[in-house]
Structures are given as structure tokens and as C-alpha cells.
Image (cartoon, rainbow, N blue to C red):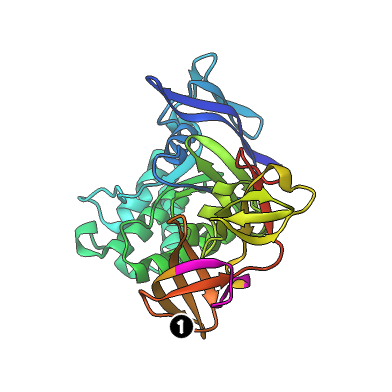
Amino acid sequence: MTALTLDRLGKRFGDHDAVRELSLQIPSGAFLVLLGPSGCGKSTTLRMVAGLEDPTSGTIAFGDRIVADGARGRSVPPSKRGLGMVFQSYALWPHMTVRQNVAWPLAVAGWSRRDRDARVGEVLESLEIAQLADRTPADISGGQQQRVAIARTIAPKPDIVLFDEPLSNLDARLRVETRSELGRVHRESGATSVYVTHDQIEALALATHIAVMNEGRLEQFGTPQELLERPATVFVASFLGSPAAVLLPVEVEGGGLVFAGRAIGVADARTPGVAHVMYRPEDVLLDDSGSVDIRVLESTPQGGRHLVTGRVADGRRVTVVADRAAQPGDSTRLRLPERPSAQFGRDGARL
């Protein structure tokens, strides 16, 4: 069953198209992450789903219910959409206790006092903040405040929950802890979740589905594994992965692939239209007999291997997974596999 459908959704601010012809179908119970760099349109998309922005074109449907239609200028108010939203800034009422903050939306929805008390106790226990019930937001940490915000959002049992970069204000340790809690809460609630972030680690840890956006457009939609194993565009290949794929611009000369004037591999039947080739970072070796010059910028130990980052001949940064360390400032070479993992045409699409 489809929980959320975006059909050719668009949003224009003056002469700027923040979102362009975005179409997605999200299955019930999915955890969708809208992923992309700042300014790509992901937050604007979330705000349109929430009802905080009206689309310029296209439609948004929850199940078979249209909640926004840009062409007709129709939009259901946020309070009538039956969803919950967790903001980046927590947005807790400072004069209320934790218990009162979580109970408030239930009171507004007409829950009885008995049912409110039972549900508040349930979600506070679930998020391990029951001991904070009688404190105010000023008396608890940022990570605890974010858990309260999540508890308040899921307490009314919404069918769809929206997250607007909810972990960006937390330190690294708290981000990891709270991310784990979000995943657990999602699995237990069964709600369809839509989560905005520019952090691919968050996306890969939480998502059942990822929509990668760039300049207002959808680059690729699929499961994390699909996007990592088969990126559809140069942008997705360069943006996703830790480290990201090694991408090199190439020319085809005499049946071979040429980068920076040096042959790096064998051409194949798809090669005449190729503009970029992709290699997995773990398949590229540091080797002085290789074909691509690199000047090392940094070398970071990781799990018995080393992430070596440097600049190649055209000035671009690349990172490879090496079995030895390298010193910043060293000059060496990369030995590439005979054939790339993927090839991309001049329009950036996979061949």
C-alpha cells in the first residue's frame, strides 16, 4: 500500500525553481530519507508535505487522499493532515514539563485524561526519558530535549512522521545514540517516516528508501543498497558512499580510456559516449607503477586499512581504501582495475 505520493511536485520562489517535477511513491511503513546538499530542495519538499508551503505545481496524496494540488491552488491545513513533525530546533514549550509537552497534542486531539496518562507514560518509557517527566526543557540536555520532541510527535500515533534534520544540533556521540533510538521507534510504531538530511551516514543507517536530490530535481530513488551498488548518475556516485566512488573524466583514444593524457584502461562497446568512469575506492591501489598521479593530502587509519585522500592531475580530490599508510605531501600513483565499475555519459547518466 502506498502511504505518500508526490506527483510532478514543484515549488517556485520568484524566478527560482526550488523543486522541479518531483515524483515519488512511498510504501506504507517506509523510512524515506530526502538526501542532498544544502539548497537541493529537500527541506522545501518536506515543508510542502507538512502543509507549511503550498506547491506551485503537482499534487501530494496521503494514501488516496489528495492533500495539496498546485494547479488548483488547494491545500489541506497542516492540522488536518494527520501527521507529526520533529523540528531541528526541538520547539518545546518552555513553561511546560516534559510530561505536559508530550500530553498537550493528545489533549488537543480530545484524548481522555486516563488515555493521555497511559500513552505519555508509554512513549516516555520507550524513549528512556520517564525519569525526566517532571522537569522543564531548561533542566535537561539537548539530546534529552530532542527525545522529548520525538515523544511528543509520536504520542498521537500519526500515520506519517516528518523529521527536519532533527540531529544536526547534537554532538557526534548524541547523534549516534539518538539515531539508533529513531530507528527503533520507527520499527515499533510502524509509521511512514520522511526524514531530511545532508548527512549520508544518517541516511544509510536509517533509510529503507533514499531519494537523492540535486538542484531541485530527483537524481535517484531506491534502497540504500541499490544506490550504493548501482548509482544512476555521476552526482549520486560522487555524493553517496563513505568514501565516495573514484570518478575520473575521460576521453576515448585508440580503443582506450585516457585521463590527463595517460591511458588508464580498455574501452568497450558503450565507451564512445562516455565522459566519466567510476571505480570502487577499495579496488584502487596505491602503487608507484600505476597510471594516475596523486599527491597525498591525508591518510586516516580505519579498521586495519587506511583512507588515503589526495589530488589527481586535474585537481579533483579522490579517496581510496589502501592497505598501507601514506604521508601527506607524498607523490605516488593509483593503479586502477582494467575496467571501471561504471561509465557515465556526457549528460551525467549511467551508460
Q: Residue at x 52, y 86 (%)?
A: 304
Q: Was residue 146 drawn as part of the magenta stretch in this picture?
A: no
Range covered by the magenta-colored residues: 283-294
Q: Was residue 292 drawn as part of the magenta stretch in this picture?
A: yes
Q: Is residue 32 found left or right of 125 in the rendered image?
A: right
User: What residue would you read off at disc 1?
Assistant: 325
Residue farthest along the top direction in this orientation: 72
Instruction: Note whether 123 is above or below 333 in the view shown.
Output: above
Work out whether residue 237 can be spotted: yes
Q: Is residue 184 found left or right of 132 in the rendered image?
A: right
Quarter of the picture holding the N terminus: top right
Give coordinates of residue 79: x percent, y percent: 43, 32
Observer-nearest residue: 111 or 173?
Answer: 173
Q: Residue at x 41, y 28 (%)?
A: 53
Give coordinates of residue 13: x percent, y percent: 38, 23
Secondary structure beneath disc 1?
loop
Instruction: Note whether 178 is above or below 270 in the view shown.
Output: below
Instruction: Note whether 73 is above or below 23 in the view shown.
Output: above
Which quadrant would residue 299 be assigned to in this image?
bottom left
What amino acid does circle 1 point to? Ala
Give coordinates of residue 227: x percent, y percent: 63, 54
Q: Is residue 228 found left or right of 172 in the rendered image?
A: right
Observer-nearest residue: 209 or 69?
Answer: 209
